[in-house]
Image: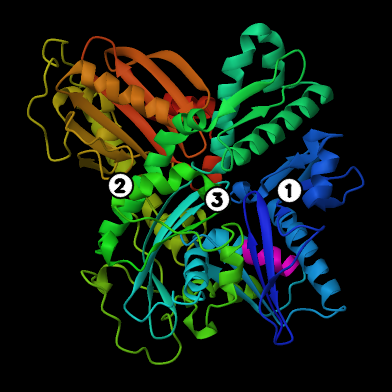
Amino acid sequence: MRILSVDLGTSNTVAVLSAHGMPPRVVEVDGSANMPSAVFATEEGTIMVGRDAERRARLDPTRFEPNPKRRIDEQTLLLGTDVVPVTEALAAILRRVLEETSRQLGGDQPDEVRLTHPAQWGHTRRTVLMSAARLAGMGPNILLVPEPVAAAAHFASFPGKALAPGQALAVYDLGAGTFDVAVVGATQNGFTVLAEDGLPDLGGLDVDQALMVHVGREVSHSDPQRWQRLLRPESTADRRTRRALQEDVKAAKEALSRHPQTEVPMPEPFKDVLVTRSELEGLVRPAMLRSVELLSRTLRSSGLAPDRLAGIYLVGGSSRLPLVGTMIAEKLGVVPGSLDQPETAVALGAQHVARDGLSVRTQNVEGAVAAGAPPQHRPQYSPPAPPPPQYPGYAPSNFPPSGPQPMPSNFPAYSPAPERAEPKSGGRKKLLIGIAAAVVVALAVGLTLFLTSSSSVATYTADQCRTPGQTDDKGFTGCLRQLAGKIADTGDCKPGMGNGPAAPAQRLGASSTCSAPGRAGTQVTYVHGDNADTLKQYTDGLLTSAGGDRTEADWGGNGLKGHYSSAAGKTSAVLVFTVADRPLAGFIYQLNTNDQAAATTPGTLADYFEASVQPGE
């Protein structure tokens, strides 16, 4: 049996092969265990990958994409003047791995291919990965393995580290593009994920960016214009220089994992910059603290105390940062371990996962790709399941080991699941019913307006809105209804600010959250603050957390005047609108978890606000 396992990472891809009864071994591609997960589109229409792609990037950086996996939610990539489907870019990487494996097998193909993926990936992303594997020619026998399950299997393969049924392991996976954490329990048949979470905006690339910003602070003052050209290159020469500098910054980060200090070579006219490990740790400590706190929360949600674990296993190249292990030990009182090369642990572990111990939740994509049908969720194991192992303090009903996982608590309760943009069975029927209902409502509202044309929206003075008063069943005060306008009556509004990532830890005042009209998965929240300064501090924090560029303008309607600011980053898009003379504010909050969100800009969000949310006169 020849089994090939592939960990297609954000920055690097690792492949492991077991064949001819020999132990699993890493497949070296282009002479290295790690092949860069990079692609380059040539003008002739071919896609180069790995180190060949990196070399060609020096000639024309516009045709280069170093991290296509990070763009898996996008349908296409613009490489130079060519539009390349994301599936083709990922398939090119997998095809190169398959070609090298076949060469080492004397022309034969693997009997089975195992592809790893983050545990939190939904059906849409798993389908893209499976489609890329099919396109790469990996054959009909393809299995998908959750990364923490593979990591746990690798941990358990070491002498003295075997996990007995009922034991659990925490997997801390800090890769280049994302951070994932999971608590994996051993069962009679294999492993199951007891709890999982992640940070899509934290990884080694973000550490690189923090170090780049630090280097810029050290040298940019000597030639600000030249530094800006590096940050926003317009010529091919500037793009080449920026690419070389990014590689040098990444190399410096890796060197600081082994040495207390190193130098970053800088392009002319800047001087080389000496950076120390303590400086780097100071830059990334807040981000690493987020990961350690999420690890702690995930352990609590699993019902397992740190001292009841078989261990905390570090995987992912960025977990090499010495600060990671130190902070985990300080926070949880457990010293984490890294038993092998962190970059290869997942691919090696996929080899050790028993086939009947794989969750069918990750396999049902295969039939959907082949037949073009949505997956049907089935029980985790095909044979009768043995009695579930008992984990101290763990209730199996809270974290089902198979089937679709419950929505994480950090998502708004009224938001659809991440793969909500896909057509669902019966969705058209629901839409027609909704349209019919909307028509009836519209006719009723129109008739009411016609019969009561002299009526108008109730308005309030600034003094009347100075503090929140009584609220209605939707959470609106009279002043908030004036701000919400028609959405207060036509939107699906509920009291409070939901339980999503936009919900504050402290009470801000009276509030109501509504579904955004005509924008699935987006919410509009209205707040009548107890304190204007606290409210402003909170809304400013929302904009800062979104990051990216901003768009600002004044607005007016329903007797109110104010200002709005819009920001859109990698993981969320936010528009905050405030009222000039009273503690009223609203914000549109959108999690970037679907294809539509990928195209959101501050300008498009501002257009939506003016057309659909801004109260009319």
Q: Residue at 50% of width from left, 73% of height from top?
A: 153
Magenta segment, prevailing SS (helix, strand or loop): helix
Query: Considering the image in quadrants, where does the N terminus appear?
Result: bottom right
Q: Is residue 131 magenta?
A: yes
Please determine whether, in this image, residue 263 is positioned above or below residue 38: above
Report the coloring of the rendering. Answer: rainbow
Dot placed on the residue nearer the N-terminal end, 3 or 2:
3
Inspect this view and state whether residue 469 appears.
yes
In the image, taking residue 430 as reference, residue 248 lies left or right, namely right
Q: Residues within 10 Å of mark 3 (few under 14, many from 20)?
A: many
What residue span does the magenta drawing correspond to? 129-135
Give the foreground label among 3 and 1: 3
Residue 486 screen position, x and y as percent? 29, 31
Alpha carbons under labels 3 and 2: distance apart: 21 Å
Q: Is residue 370 magenta?
A: no
Instruction: Tell me the residue that label 1 is attached to.
Output: 38
